[in-house]
Image (cartoon, rainbow, N blue to C red):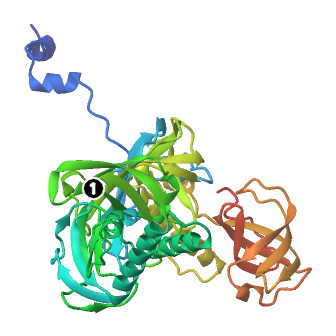
């Protein structure tokens, strides 16, 4: 064998050995894959796809983004926004847009408006008072002296006809003698006729009428006519069963005609006068039943009837007195006791209602936030009707079944007001005095800039036109303006309200201007900026 042939055989052997080793290594790898080695699993399963970072947004919701992490002037970190998290759908002009994450943080809760009958109970504080029709005063109609007291203390219960006191009066004694003499004269002239008998009878009748006018009882008059003797003292009796609520009589005192010596009140039935607030008085009707609770008897409930609604209002408390009459067995209810009154108020059938917490009352308007969709809320002005403890009737503004915000609605309202204010500042800064932003605060280039453009713009609108006229006193200006793309308005002439009179400086009819305006409330368009001369560049806010 020559040298060349030996060299060729050597090279061939090395090649065969290398091929065998490659085949053996491949077989071992296959074996490892079959046995479930971690390296093989990692190769077989696809790796999780990383979310794509789009930009960093302002933590306070301002229209400011950054391609790199940064902090706002208050030291708060900007929030990272990843692909799929941004919401490019702009909110409608009459809607409030809040991210789902913020909605969850605010604790927003909604409830559907429903048809229900409103049954309300008006609660009021009251006091027990005696029935004014059951109060009696004992006042002699003649002058005299108190001889003797049978009832000598205030608060003593008395029965009907029970003696109260005895009096002596010279006039009373004279009147009794006149009647006794006249009665005897009539008896003696029975056999006689003519004018003498008639005259004596008239004298007797007038004397009897005088005694009756002085409240002398029929029993005492008969005793006087029978005996013919005038009594020195006359007894006054109680006209009703009740309680002596006032006693001015003292033994031996002199009294004048008409002076009230005793006052007796019948407390078998009493009044409870409740002070009902002004906003509830329209629902209280006479004849309705009422429940009364007294602190002294917490386990008892007294029932009465509303008999009168007073025609006057107490200006100090803005309440109207309502009278409730109720029986008082056992005289448990005592005058001047404090009472808690419940006046049930019937509804007018089923009406559209929302929880009372859903209404934002500004004093001039009542607003309800209706959830249009996830993260979209539409403020609506509503007209309210009757109320119950937890619900209020909505006569206009919300339909049955629409979801309304019942929790955190004030926070949503504050959020929307903050965004409107910030948006107004942002538009004002476009006038040329806005501070320059640094490179980190600038909008991201490329795809990030596209995302920034999709974010909602500020709430102002821009237009160009010609001044037709203005009224400084009324604070209005009439402008013939061109189309407003942000509102999809065609060109027209309309009147705007001025944010302040200083905007008219240098403005005169016929002047071409560019201006910015906002909607302060539905239908009221307010100009915030006026610049003489129409802009030659494209409107930067034409798309919002």
Q: Is residue 141 above or below residue 61?
A: below
Q: Tell me what residue is drawn at x 53 percent, y 71 percent.
A: 421
**Percent x, y for residue 26?**
14, 15
Quarter of the figure with residue 147? bottom left
**Secondary structure state at the residue bearing disc 1:** loop
Determine which residue is flagged by label 1. Answer: 268
Q: Residue furthest right?
A: 510
Q: Is residue 99 visible?
A: no
Measuring from the top left, give residue 171's x and y in whole percent. 38, 87
Is 15 on the left-hand or right-hand side of 59?
left
Q: How many marks on residues?
A: 1
Q: Is residue 475 left or right of residue 301?
A: right
Residue 15: horizontal and vertical position, in percent?
15, 15
> In the rendered image, is residue 436 in sight?
yes
Q: Nearer the viewer, residue 66 or 521?
A: 521
Tell me the residue at 27%/69% (across/down): 237
Q: Residue furthest front?
A: 191
User: Residue placed at 56% from the left, 75% from the top?
Assistant: 425
Q: Residue farthest to the top?
A: 1
| Quadrant into which the N terminus falls | top left
Badge 1, how many Cα within 10 Å: few under 14, some, many 20+?
Answer: some
In this view, the residue in front, 439 or 118, is 118
- Judge whether 213 appears above or below 59 on screen: below
Where is 148 relative to 30, above or below?
A: below
For the residue pair 343 and 395, the one nearer the viewer reads as 343
The x, y position of residue 448, in whole percent, is: 49, 54
Q: Quadrant of the C terminus?
A: bottom right
Along the line of sight, the residue nearer the viewer: 296 or 280? 296
Rendered view: 534 above or below 292: below
């Amino acid at each position: 064998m020559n040298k060349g042939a030996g060299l060729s055989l050597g090279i061939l052997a090395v090649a065969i050995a290398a091929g065998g080793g490659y085949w053996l290594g491949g077989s071992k790898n296959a074996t490892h894959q079959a046995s479930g080695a971690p390296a093989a699993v990692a190769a077989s399963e696809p790796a999780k796809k990383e979310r794509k970072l789009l930009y960093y947004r302002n933590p306070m919701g301002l229209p400011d983004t950054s391609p790199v992490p940064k902090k706002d002037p208050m030291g708060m970190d900007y929030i990272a926004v990843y692909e799929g998290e941004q919401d490019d759908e702009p909110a409608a002009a009459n809607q409030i847009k809040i991210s789902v994450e913020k909605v969850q943080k605010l604790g927003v809760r909604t409830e559907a408006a429903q048809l229900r009958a409103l049954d309300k109970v008006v609660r009021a504080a009251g006091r027990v008072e005696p029935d004014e029709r059951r109060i009696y005063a004992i006042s002699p109609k003649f002058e005299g002296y108190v001889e003797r007291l049978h009832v000598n203390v205030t608060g003593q219960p008395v029965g009907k006809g029970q003696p109260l006191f005895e009096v002596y009066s010279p006039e009373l004694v004279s009147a009794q003698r006149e009647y006794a003499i006249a009665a005897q004269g009539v008896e003696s002239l029975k056999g006689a006729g003519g004018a003498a008998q008639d005259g004596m009878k008239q004298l007797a009748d007038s004397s009897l009428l005088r005694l009756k006018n002085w409240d002398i009882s029929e029993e005492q008059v008969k005793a006087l006519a029978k005996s013919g003797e005038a009594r020195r003292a006359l007894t006054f009796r109680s006209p009703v069963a009740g309680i002596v609520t006032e006693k001015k009589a003292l033994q031996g005192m002199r009294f004048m005609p008409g002076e009230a010596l005793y006052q007796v009140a019948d407390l078998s039935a009493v009044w409870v006068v409740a002070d009902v607030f002004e906003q509830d008085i329209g629902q209280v009707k006479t004849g309705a039943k009422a429940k009364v609770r007294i602190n002294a008897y917490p386990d008892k409930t007294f029932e009465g009837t509303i008999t009168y609604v007073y025609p006057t209002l107490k200006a100090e408390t803005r309440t109207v007195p309502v009278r409730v009459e109720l029986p008082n067995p056992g005289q448990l209810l005592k005058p001047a006791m404090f009472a808690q009154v419940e006046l049930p108020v019937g509804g007018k059938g089923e009406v559209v209602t929302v929880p009372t917490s859903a209404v934002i009352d500004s004093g001039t308007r009542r607003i309800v936030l209706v959830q249009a969709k996830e993260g979209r809320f539409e403020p609506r002005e509503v007209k309210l009707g009757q109320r119950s403890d937890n619900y209020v009737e909505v006569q206009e503004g919300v339909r049955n079944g629409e979801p309304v915000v019942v929790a955190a609605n004030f926070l949503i309202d504050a959020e929307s007001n903050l965004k409107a204010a910030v948006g107004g500042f942002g538009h004002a800064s476009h006038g040329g005095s806005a501070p320059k932003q640094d490179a980190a605060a600038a909008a991201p280039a490329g795809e990030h800039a596209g995302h920034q453009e999709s974010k909602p713009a500020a709430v102002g609108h821009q237009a160009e036109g010609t001044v037709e006229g203005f009224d400084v006193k009324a604070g209005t200006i009439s402008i013939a303006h061109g189309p407003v793309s942000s509102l999809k308005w065609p060109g027209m002439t309309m009147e705007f309200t001025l944010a302040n009179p200083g905007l008219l400086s240098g403005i005169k009819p016929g002047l071409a201007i560019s201006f910015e305006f906002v909607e302060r409330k539905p239908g009221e368009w307010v100009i915030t900026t006026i610049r003489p001369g129409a802009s030659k560049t494209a409107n930067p806010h034409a798309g919002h």
